[in-house]
Amino acid sequence: MDKKVQSRIQKLEFLLKQMDKIHLRDAADMLNVSEMTIRRDLSTNTGSVVLLGGYIVKDPQKANDNNYLIFEQETKHIAEKMQVGKLAAELVQDGDVVFFDCGSTVPFIASQINSSIKFTALCCSINSFLVLQEKPNCHVILCGGHYSRHNSFLTPIQLNTELDAICTTKAFISAAGVDVKQGVTCFNVDEAKTKHKAMAKTQQSILVFDSSKINKVQQAYVGNLQQFDIFVCDQALPAEFNVIKSSILTE
């Protein structure tokens, strides 16, 4: 590899240790080259940096399968997540106190809640917060903690958090895997702990997931299917899920 190309790739790799993504235009400005030059560099590079949707990111193929990258997930199954978001958003009513989980599906719920509805939102991720704070009649409470660039998630650093102090009427819980035998799972153990607490403090646990998650199992256990009151998915669930007694919403 040309030394100049190698130097630019190394600089990009260093920058991606500080942030989860870099816009192509910003990268070109920082390296004082054209966008076409960077495109050419990345097209011939076999390292750990790739161009994805106008952003430079760490190559997901070089990462561990269990390494969840929120930016990568945001570009997948958009139509399905929009449908899930539409159905779930219709469940929010005036006066509700709602927990919004982390993950790439949850912002699609927040964005489709009618702006006239007055409700309180409790959230633990920046991507959900950014959508909720634009709702004029939404009172937003953001849980604090250590910020993870990989999943835009805030992990509590104190024993008692906002989740302990607030009882919600509804909790939207996202999943990376939904399986009849193995139950509901996600990628991250810290996320699973927060989901557990949110489910324990709510009147109604609502599982939200797109159909690509069906029959998938990830490393962090969230709970069995019977722990959820409502399922929201973009399509009807397979026949083996008929053992579940909870309500299931589909298109």
Image (cartoon, rainbow, N blue to C red):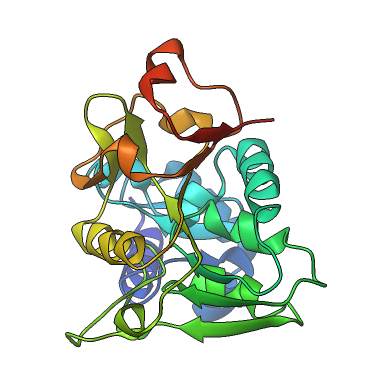
Judge whether 208 appears above or below 102 on screen.
above
For the point 41% across and 27% down, the residue is: 214
Which quadrant of the structure image shows residue 37? bottom right
Q: Position of residue 217 (x, y in %)?
A: 26, 33
Q: Quadrant of the C terminus?
A: top right
For the point 43% across and 18% down, the residue is: 242
On the rendered structure, is 241 left or right of 138?
A: left
On the rendered structure, is 22 left or right of 47?
A: right
For the point 76% across and 82% down, the residue is: 136
Residue 23 visible in the current orientation: yes
Q: Position of residue 45 (x, y in %)?
A: 39, 47
Q: Position of residue 250 (x, y in %)?
A: 63, 31
- Which of 98 and 190 lies nearest the eye of the viewer? 98
Q: Position of residue 174 (x, y in %)?
A: 43, 50
Judge whether 63 appears above or below 139 on screen.
above
- Which of 201 and 27 lies nearest the eye of the viewer? 201
